Amino acid sequence: MTQPVLSVRNLTVEFPTRHGLLTAVQDISFDIMPGEVLGVVGESGAGKSMTGAAIIGLIDPPGRIAKGEIWLGDRRIDNLPPAEMRKIRGRRIGMIFQDPLTSLNPLYRISRQLIETIRTHLPLSQSEARTRAIKLLDDVGIPDAARRIDDYPHQFSGGMRQRVVIALALCADPEVVIADEPTTALDVSVQAQIIDVMKEICARRGAAIMLVTHDMGVIAETADRVAVMYAGRLAELGPVAAVIKDARHPYSQGLMGAIPKLGENLDRLVHIPGAMPRLNAIPQGCAFNPRCPQVFEKCRTHRPAASEIEPGRRAACWLYPEVTEA
Amino acid sequence: MSDTLLDVRHLSRRFDVSAPWLNRKLEGLDKTYVNAVKDVSFTVAKGQTFALVGESGSGKSTIARLIVGLLEPTEGEIVFDGTSLARGLKGAEARRLRRRFQMIFQDPLASLNPRWRVTDIIAEPLRVFERSMNDRARRLRVGELLTLVGLSPEDGLKFPHQFSGGQRQRIAIARALAANPEFIVCDEPTSALDVSVQAQILNLMKDLQDEFGLTYVFISHNLQVVRHMATEIGVLYLGRLAEVGEAEALFATPQHPYTRMLLDAVPDIEMTGRRRKQVEGEIPSPIDPPPGCPFHPRCPFANDRCRTEVPGLTRRGAQAAACHAVEEGRI
């Protein structure tokens, strides 16, 4: 069996505050295989971005990884000193963030930003790095890359800027790319282009993607497997088609029903009452129990672990007999 | 049912985006204008939901603001229930008309005063429009409204920041309903919300429409949401209507190449295996729109006529598209 390129084991992220300890991510485990696209979906505050930040070692203090391990190949990376982590970030793990304007320095030409990143990670000369940068821009679909490389970020449109960010993330041939809401700031027509580019170029280079988004549509089109997060915990994990068509956790079932769809015209959408709890008010037992239509006694007192309910699928819900206590 | 409540006729709005006077003089620049909305006409029947869709920069929000009177049109007019909302509508007459329509904005945190208690926020339209109402009656009415949108009357004592995004949008809806309007303009009411909360708000808006016979103009960039809400749809591209028609027909047989492209670009969440078509290019800057049909640089069917002549809306059954290719039967 091949070794996962990224392995997150029992990750817990905590924020000590004046009002007590907040657990932003609780006991999350998943693997990403080489070349695989893992979608991480959830509503705001579900902890999906925080999971991404923990993997790349960019949790803002006072937040910290309280428990668990993160393995990149056969190297443990959650306890590395900052200088070591810096060598991995960008080199072995690429990053794409939501807003391309904030990930690019507005004062530097694109060429400088790309060449600097390439030369930080790879032993290339200035001109070799420039050739590589032009090739990268060409790969992500920027027309006339040799000329446009000397433009500033503001001279690009939103979609083109996001392409530049993708090029930047891929410039040292990373094994994993963590994409945090890469298409959220873009219009639908451009969104489709960016997803295609990202998927194609990562497939060609064999990079795995962890795609963090709230948009189930993007996941459906891009990911191989999907992890549904709720209140900092993993609710369900499985192959995309299976989770979309036949969700097991009541939260993922509600989430799927709440999305309006083009193919059907329902009079009403599935209504999940209430809202996701705040971090300081996560209920006892299963975090979803106050909103769950199938809640029973055990859900209010005991927290279910995300156990395997059938091969390749995990769910954290007492409805499934295989589920154990966390 | 087909009583026309709102009639928008040849509406245009131009914004002056020139550089400051001194820069213009020194650098020899001319004044520059943006035609945010150009020659848009549509009608909305009573009790219906008319949706405006388009990408950013297509002029959706400008039209919303023109309808409720937050902006004045450069050209054209808006007729509400037989009365023209032309410039200079003032005083009691304006107030009588204005209380019949309301607006819900995208970001409820920006549209609710953070220093006011929710009761005061919701009671404000009542203070303006129902001057004879006494305090007690007003308080009761606010309680009723809060219950109506799924909050409890005690929530009125809180401030907006004490609520979640979805609850804040409920407060905005309660405020919009306070003066018993017939017509509500909703500008991206659920874009800032998570899907499960979005579903709650959309369901609530549908229920309220059924209960009070409301008419909505619903603005969104999300085609799935529009599909769920609208009875009639207008597709905007660079400030012009590309296509307008009954929702069912427009989704079943889109005419305009832009509408087809938009529908193709919607992610395939039902996993039907429908291959998403690669879409070319991005929406150009509205400051310097292409001549002829604004969509021609991205259009696979463009010919010389499209590059020079602006197409008008041609009606065909339940739909009308502004496209030479459709008119000539080329597609």
Image: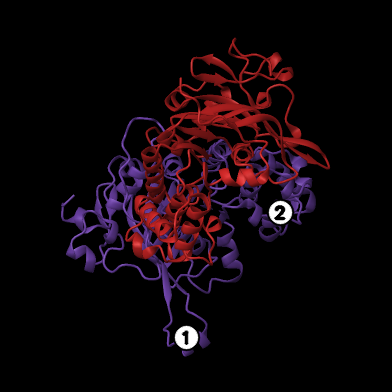
Chain colours: A red, B purple
Between tags 1 and 2, which lies in front? 1
**Placement of A71 over or under A110, stated as above or below:** above
Residue B39, visible in the rendered structure: no
For the residue pair A89 and B49, the one nearer the viewer reads as A89
The reply to whether label 1 and label 2 mark residues of one chain is yes
Q: Is residue A47 left or right of residue B132?
A: left
**Amino acid type, mark 2:** Ile
Q: Which chain is home to disc 2?
A: B
- Sequence-wise first label, 1 or 2: 1
Counting from the top left corner in percent of width and height, residue A55 is at: 60, 38
Whether label 1 touches label 2, CB < 8 Å: no
For the residue pair B318 and A232, the one nearer the viewer reads as A232
**Amino acid type, mark 1:** Arg
Residue B148, visible in the rendered structure: yes
Residue at the extreme bottom: B25
Counting from the top left corner in percent of width and height, residue A178 is at: 52, 41
Residue sitting at 42 percent across and 84 percent down?
Answer: B29
Counting from the top left corner in percent of width and height, residue A69 is at: 65, 29
- Give the label on residue B24, or none: 1
- Give the label on residue B121, or none: 2
Residue sitting at 75 percent across and 45 percent down?
Answer: B156
Q: Which chain is home to disc 1?
A: B
